[in-house]
Image (cartoon, rainbow, N blue to C red):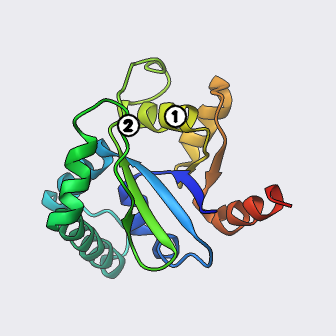
Amino acid sequence: MSRQFVTEAVMVAIYGQLLASPASVEYIVPYTTILELYEFQASSDPLMGNPADDQHVKTKINEMISYFEEPLNKKKIERALLIPWAKSPSILFGDQVSIAIINAVDTAQYGEYFDPIETELILTSQRLSIPILTDQVELIARIIESSAPVQVYDIDDFDFAMDEESLDQV
């Protein structure tokens, strides 16, 4: 069985190890984070401190956008956008990795602690009972502080999170 995580599309673009997983993994990505990729693509603001890293990440964002715009993938995504909380069929990224897009709906349930995308991540995690994967230490701290009923992993702990699944199946 594939391990699942809720994450943002930009996390998959920035952290190459997420697409080079040693085991089967599916990332559930709220559609609004796909829209964020277009904002990052159009922005002249750097995403990374190092210019070479920034150029690499922007190239990966462009590749990801192009892949999502391929006719079959675009059709899968568009189908999910017809109904709130619908999830697209998996979009494959190699042998071990797939991404499913979810039409998450921000209900402002966590509006005082989290922005709309963070709220969508939390609600998706709750709805599907799968952990969030993020690099945002502040978000992790706010999730803990607010007692949001979700599990969250720092991207630096990705290998550990993948190992957790193997321990759960024993």
Q: Residues within 10 Å of mark 2 (few under 14, many from 20)?
A: some
Residue drawn at point x = 63 percent, y = 27 percent? 148
Residue at 32% x, 38% y: name it. Answer: 103
Q: Secondary structure at mark 1?
A: helix
Indicate which disc residue 117 carries. Answer: 2
Pinpoint residue 5: horizontal percent, then vertical percent: 55, 53
Of the two numbered discs 2 and 1 on the same chain, state the one appearing first in sequence. 2
Q: Is residue 152 left or right of residue 89?
A: right
Seen at 75% across and 66% down, the residue is 163
Left or right: where 5 falls relative to 19: right
Q: Position of residue 153 (x, y in %)?
A: 64, 52
Amino acid marked by disc 2: Ile
Location of the N terminus by quadrant is bottom right
Q: Nearer the viewer, residue 103 or 110?
A: 103
Label 1: which residue?
A: 122
Q: Which mark is residue 12?
A: none
At horizontal 32% and vertical 82% (from top left) the residue drawn is 52
Task: Specify the quadrant of the image occupied by residue 4.
Answer: bottom right
Q: Disc 1 residue type? A: Ile
- Residue 86 position within the rendered picture, expressed as x and y whole percent measured from the top left: 35, 37
Q: Indicate the position of residue 93 as horizontal and vertical percent values.
A: 39, 73
Residue 8, relative to residue 51: is it above or below?
Answer: above
Q: Badge 1, how many Cα within 10 Å: few under 14, some, many 20+?
A: many
Q: Is residue 141 above or below residue 8?
A: above
Q: Against 109, is 22 above or below?
A: below
In this rendering, is residue 121 above or below 119?
Answer: below
